[in-house]
Image (cartoon, coloured by chain):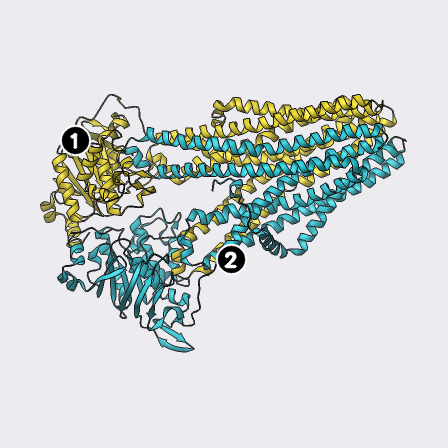
Amino acid sequence: MEVIKHMKSYRRFGVLAVVCVAAETMFELVIPIIMADIIDVGVAQHNSAVIIRQGILMVGCALLSLVLGVMYSKFSATFANGTGYSLREAIFKKIQSFSFSNIDHFSSSSLITRLTSDVTIIANSISTGLRPLVRAPVMLLSALTLSFVINAQLAIVFLIAAPLLGLILFMIISRVRPLYRIMQDTIDKVNLTIQENLIAIRVVKAFVRQDYEIGKFDVVNTEFESNSERAFRLATLNMPAMQFIMYATIIAILWFGGNLIFVGSMKVGELTGFLSYVLQVLNALMMISNVFMLLSRALTSQQRIQEVLDESNDMDLSEINPDLELQDGSIVFDHVSFKYSKSAQENVLSDISFALDSGDTVGIIGTTGSSKSTLAQLILRLYDASQGSVIVSGHDVKEYSLEHLRDAIAIVLQKNTLFSGTISENLRWGDQFASDQELIDACKIANAHDFIMSKKDGYNAKVEQGGNNFSGGQKQRLCIARALLKKPRILIFDDSTSALDRATEANIWKQMQATLPQTTKIIIAQKISSVMDADQIIIMDNGRIDSVGNHESLLKFSEIYQEIFQSQQEGVL
Amino acid sequence: MSRNRMAGYKKPQDTGKTLRILIHYLGFHRFTVIVVAVLVILSSLASVFGTYLLKPIVNDYIMVQDIAGLIQMLGFLGVIYGVGALSTLGYNQLMVGVAQKVIARIRKDLFEHTQSLPMSFFDGMTHGELMSYFTNDVDTIADALNNSFTLLVQSLTVTVGTLVMIVVLSWQLSLVVFASLFLMLVYVRYNSKKSRENFRRQQKAMASLNGYIEEIMTGQKVSRVFNHEVQDFDAFTQYSDALRSSATKAQTYAGRLVPVIVSISYMNYSLSATIGGLFAISGLMSVGSLTAYLVYVRQSAMPLNQFSQQMNFILIALAGAERIFNLMEMESEVDEGQVTLSKTGDESWTWTVDQQSTPMAGKVVFDQVSFGYEPKRMILKNISLFAKPGQKVALVGSTGAGKTTIINLISRFYEISKGSIFFDGIDLRQMEKSSLRSSLGMVNQDTHLFSGTIADNIRYGRLEATDDDVVAAAKLANADSFIRRLPQGYQTLLNNDGANLSQGQRQLLSIARTAIADPPVLILDEATSSVDTRTEKLIEKGMDKLMQGRTVFVIAHRLSTVRNADAILVLEHGEIIERGNHDELLELKGRYYQLYYGLSELS
C-alpha cells in the first residue's frame, strides 16, 4: 500500500512508539507478579523489609511505565503527523503533475477533500489506533502464555473461548461494514440536501418553499435514521457478545478448575491467577475489534488517496525534447478535434484548422458554449487534442517541455484568479524577478497603474482571496498586467476585457500593439468591439469554425457575425 | 469537514441550560431512557456482584471439595451473569433506537429553524460554517448519545460500587485510593487545558493549510500557465509543515492522558499493596480482606479511566449542543402581516384585507426609504420610486450602488430602517410574507438548481403544475429546445447545482421556473448577463412574453437590455442620480449617456 510507503521517513518514530507501548504493556503484567511476593512472602513471613522492597520495585515500575507512556505519545504523534505530512506532499506533487483531464476526472473539490480530510483521518487513526493495536496482541499472547504455564489443561478453555469471540466479532464487523457504507451514502444525501438548501436559500425564500424543503429533508433524514439504527444495532452486539463469552469462560474455569483441584492436579492459588487472565484475553480481543472498526474508516480514506496516487497521467510526455524552445509566435491548428473524455460521444471541437504568423492579431467570437476557451487551452497544452495536431513555432506542442511551452505563452483566463497576498506578489507570478519598474510599465499598459496608485499601499496593497476586494474591471486589468510581465511570444485573452469600458479597452490594445509587435495575440470575446480591429476573425459555432475573415468581409458574408453585430449595435458594455 | 472533534471543544457557556434542553429531547423517550438506565445499573451490579461471589465459591466450595454446592453456586453465578449480559444486550439495543431518534429530531428541528431565519443571518456566515452545525456539532451529540451516555452511567455505577467496597474493607487504606483519585483529577484538568490550547493551534494551522489548498486548487489553471508549480509547492510545504508540528504537539499532549492515568493507578496499586502488607503484618487487616481489597483497587482503574474519557466526550458534545441550541433560539423572520394575496381562478390575483377582496394591480412605491445591512453604513439613502402596474423599471449603476438591495427590500428579505414601501397602496409590513413573495417572480444572476430532474426544477415554481405546464414554461423561456436535446429530456437528472449544464442553460431553466409560477411582479437581477448577446436575443422573445402585463424590475449589465424600459433609474452610492426613459437620459448627456457609449466603466 502506498500509504505504508509514505510512512517510511517517519518509520523510526513508529518503531519507537511500538517499542514503548509494548514495554509499557509488559509492566502491566509484571506488576501483579511483583505484588504476589508482598502477600506470599512478605505478609506470610511477617517480613516488612520484603514488603517495602517489593513496594519500591513496583513504584519504580509504575514510574518507568509513566516515562514510556509519555515517550510513546510523543513518538506516535510524530509518526502519525509525519506520515500525514508526507502523504499530503505526495498527493500535492501528484496533482501538480496531473493534466487537466485528470483533474476534471476527480473534480477539484474532491481533490481538496482527499488532500485535507482524508489525510487527517489517516493521521488521526494512526495516533489513536496504534496503542490498542500493539497492546492488544501483547496482552493476548502474554496472558495466553502465562495461563498455559500455570495449567495447560485449563488453558484449553481459552482456546475455545477466544476463537469463538473472535469469530463472532468478525461476523459482526463484516456485516456492519456494508451497513456503514449505506449509512455514509445516506448521510451524504442529508448533507447534500442541507447544502443545496443553504446555498439556494434566497430561491427557497423567494418561492416560499420552506415547507417543501422541510418535506424533502424529512425524507432523507428519516432514511438516514433508519439506516444508522440498523448499522448501530448490529455494531453494538459486540458488547453483550463479549460479556456472554467472558461470563461463560469464568464459569467454565471455575467448574473445570474446581474439578482439577478436586483431583489434586491444580492449586487454589493458580485458579485465582487464572481467573485474572480471563478479562485480559477477552478484553484484548475487544480492543482488536474496535481497532478494526476504526481502521475500516481509515481504509476508505486510504482508498480515496490511493486512487489519486495511482491515476496515470493521460498526457503523453514521451515526445518531449527538453532543449527545444519556442523561436517565434506562429500557430497552426491542423484538423484538430477534441473531447474531454475518451468515452464522451460528441466532440467539443471538430476539425479545426487555421494558421497564424508571428505577430498576428486574431479574434475568436461565437456563442456561449461554442468551445472558444477550449481551443485556446489546447495551445498551452492544458489539454491534449484528441485528433490532429497543434503546432507552435514550427513544432507540435507535444515536443516542448511544459515549462518552455508555458513560459512562452501567456493567457488571461476567463475566470480571473488572483491570490491572497499583495498586488506586486500577484504581478510577479508573471516574472518573479521583475523589477519594480517593469511592474509599473506592465501596469501602465494594462491601465492598472492609476488605480493601484490610488490605493493607500500602492503596489503593496493587500489582495484578498480570489481578489474579492477589487472590482471586476480592476481584476481584469491586474490579470492582464500579470500576463504581460511574462513577455510572451503568444498572448491569449480569453474573454478578459468584458468588464472594461470601450475606451480603456481600446487604449490597452493600442499600447500592446506598440510594445509587443512580435507577439501573436489571440482575443476571445463576446463583444464585436473587442475583435473588430483584428487581422483575422474566426467565428466559432458548436465547436466548429463557421467562417474566417476580417470585420468588413464577415459583415458581408457571415450570417452569424451579422446577427451578433446587430445584437450589439449600441450600449453593450 | 476535516475538523477534528476536539477542535469544536469550546468550554460550554451555560451547561445547565444546554443539559436541560438535551434532557428535554431525551424526555420524548422518557420510558425507554429509564429502562436503559435501570438495565445499565443492573448489568454493572451483576458484574460487581459476580466478582464478589468468586471468593466464597473458591473458599467455601472448591477448597472443601463440595461438588454439589459448587454446581449450585455456579448455577447461581450463571443466572446473575446471564441477567447481566442480557441487560447489556437490552440497553445497547434500546439506546441505539433512542439515540438515533433524538439525533434525527434535533437535526430536523435545526433544519426547520434555519428555514425561518432572516436573510441577514445567512449573510453573516459562510456555507461551510452553516454546514458545520449539521455535521460537526450534530455528530458530537450523536457520538455522545451512541456511546458516552451508557458508558458514563455504567462506569459511574461500577466506580461507586467499587469505592464503597474499598471503604468498607478498610477506610484507612482507602485514603491512598482517594489521594490518587485526586491526583488523577488534577492531571485530567491540567492536561485537558493544555491540549485544548494546542488543539486550537492545530485547528488554526489546519484552517490556513486548507485555505491555501482550496485557493491553489481552484486556481490550478492559473498556476500551470504561469509555471508556478515550484513556488506553490514550497508554500504548500510550509503550511503543511506548520500543521505537522502543531498537530504533533497537540496530539503529544492529548496522548499522554491515558498512560499517565494508568501509571497513577499502578502507583495507587503499588502503594495500596505495600501499606496494606504492612497493615496485615501489624494485624490491622486480615490477609483475606487485603487480597479482596487489592482486586477492587485493580478493578477501579478501568471504569475511572473510562469515566474521565467519557466525561471529555460529553463536554465536547455539550459544546456542540450549545451551539445548536443557540442557533435554534435565534429569532425567526418577523411576519405580522395580515393582508393575504391569492390567485383565484385562472388569471387574477386578489388581495384579502379583513376578508374584503380586491383585485391586485401591481403598483410598487418606495417612499423615502433608507437602509443599511449594518446600522452604521447606509446603502440606500432616501430612495423614492414609483412603478405603475405593468411598467418596466430598470435599475442601472455600478456594483455596490444598491440595485440588488432595492430588490431585496421589495421581497422584504430585510427590514428597512426608514421610510415605507407600498405594494398596491398596502404597506409591505402589513402583508403576509409568504403572500408577498409568491407574488414576486425572481430570476437572479446566480442560478441555483436542485438535485432532481429538469422537470422537478421547473416545477419548483409551482409544485402542482402539470407536465404540460412545465413544457409550456420551458417553451416560454426558450429552454424547451435544449432540454429536448438532452439524453433524457425533461427527466434528465441534474446534480451538483446543475453542473452538467452550461451557465446559459441554467439561466434558461431558472427563467422557466419563474415563468411557471406566473407572478404578477417580475424581478430580473442580471438574469441574462451570463449568456452571450446572440443567445440573449433568443431568450428575449420569451422574456418579452413573460413580462407582458406584469410590473417588472430589471437590473442589467448590458444597457441594451434595459433600453426599452418605461423608466430607467441610475443609482450611484445609494442614491438615484438620474431618472427617465432611454431617450430622455441620452439627451441629458449625464452618467447614463457615458455608460451607454462606453465612455466609463461599470463594475
The numbered mark at residue A330 is 1
Up/down of A369 relative to A248, above or below: below
- Number of other residues with Cα within 10 Å of mark 1, as a class: few under 14, some 14 to 19, many 20 or more: many
Secondary element under disc 1, as helix, strand or loop, is: loop
Q: Is residue A510 left or right of residue A90?
A: left
Q: Give the left or right position of residue B503, taking residue B69 as reference.
A: left
Q: Can residue A189 be seen here?
A: no
Looking at the picture, which amino acid does disc 2 mark? Glu
Q: Is residue A507 left or right of residue B172?
A: left
Residue type at mark 1: give it.
Answer: Ser
**Mark seen at residue B329:** 2
- Circle 2 marks a residue in which chain? B
Residue A146, percent from left and from top: 73, 23
Query: How packed is label 2: few (under 14 Cα within 10 Å), some, or many (20 or more)?
Result: few
Q: Which mark is residue A6?
A: none
Q: Position of residue A438 (x, y in %)?
A: 20, 33
- Which chain is rendered yellow in the image? A
Residue A413 appears in the figure: yes
Residue A195 spot, x, y in % from top left: 44, 50
Spot the cyan chain and give its letter: B
